[in-house]
Amino acid sequence: MKVTLRIRRFNPEHDARPYWAEYIIKDVAPTDRVLDLLHHVKWYIDGTLALRRSCAHGICGSDAMRINNLNQLACKALVKDLVKGDHGTIQVEPILGLRVIKDLIVDMEPFFEHYRSVMPFFVNDNPPPDGEFLQTPEQRARFDDTTKCILCAACTTSCPSFWANGTYVGPAAIVQAHRFIFDSRDTAAQERLAVLSQEDGVWRCRTIFNCTTACPRDIEVTKAIAEVKNAINRGGVD
Amino acid sequence: MSGLFTTVREVFRYQGREGQVAWMGHRAAALGTVLFFMIHIIDTSFVYFWPEGYQHAIALYRSPLFAVGEMVLIPAVIYHAINGTRIWLMDWKPGLWKYQRQITLATFALTVLLCAPVMIIMGGHFIEGLGLFGGQ
Ligand code: SF4
Ligand code: FES
């Protein structure tokens, strides 16, 4: 099959504003991924195309982009899910709400700043009882879903609330906070809840559900956010 | 951060689902209602400051344009109330997220259902007021 790949390109050193570039790619297999098409452009048509990717298998979280107006990982988006018939167009642009450095590469620093603000690490200064901290399967299940996050930013940059206001901590940081807030072994839940109850914390979430749809790890993002909202309202996790 | 203009443009481009549509409607309904109330508060203040202007404003309210405005206001208020309840429910019971699509569609349906009688009555008055079909 044949695919017209429309890519939103921008090189701040040369271009006054971003523009759409089109590349026609032949002999595309329906099971090819959008990342394969981007590689084809970069390797055989125009080497100046800039994009981030590393693992190419949905693990590292570096190639979130807006594909056909929906945030996805280029390495997980299959051509057959985007193009019906023998010829079609796929549109690729950078995720929104973060400054574009070049083409599909955005400045992730504000995103990671929000991530760091929620203390995304295990806190417990007590000596482990009997050699290690124990946890029941039920206690472990409480935060299992949010352990799957790969920090790709697909959720945060799908959120209209984040587009409008980049100071909003965003779904990804809340997911990361959730992972530790609901961990029975951790002792810093109150500190994280204090951060997230501030003006730019969870209350900027308008329950739009774009994040849940965008997450390539199928994390129940909006549910996790609601659980954190409830924990703040109740004054704790229990 | 992308700013207000980009955000408004992008909510029409990004392929969000029911939740995004519901949110856009929620915002539009709120802004519309606030605008209507602002106009109403200002013209009511005319009673005190500028009585002739008040009479003029009342006459304006009887014009077809404002009749249509009022017919938009009612669904806006009803939708904002029902959708607000939905958001509160989804936040209060996170487990409901699995049914969020159905609950959002139900919100739309309930809005239409509750608006229908009001629309029929107001629409009837509106058509009468226009003097079509031999009305006064
Ligand atoms: S919650 Fe999902 S979409 Fe958001 S950063 Fe983590 S993996 Fe990506
Ligand atoms: S390249 Fe690693 S997640 Fe796609």
Image (cartoon, coloured by chain):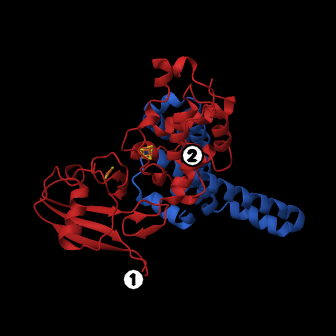
In the displayed structure, would residue B111 be above or below residue A157? Answer: above
Ligand 1 shown in quarter: top left
Q: Nearer the viewer, residue B32 or A19?
A: A19
Q: Colour of chain A?
A: red
Identified by mark 2, the residue type is: Arg
Quarter-of-image position of residue A63: bottom left
Check residue A32 in the rendering and tell me which mark sits there, or answer none: none
Q: Nearer the viewer, residue A153 or B40?
A: A153
Q: Residues within 10 Å of mark 1 (few under 14, many from 20)?
A: few
Identified by mark 1, the residue type is: His
Check residue A14 in the rendering and tell me which mark sits there, or answer none: 1
Q: Earlier in the sequence, mark 1 or mark 2?
A: 1
Same chain shared by disc 1 and disc 2: yes
Q: Which residue is mark 2?
A: A206
Q: Residues within 10 Å of mark 2 (few under 14, many from 20)?
A: some
What subunit carries mark 1? A
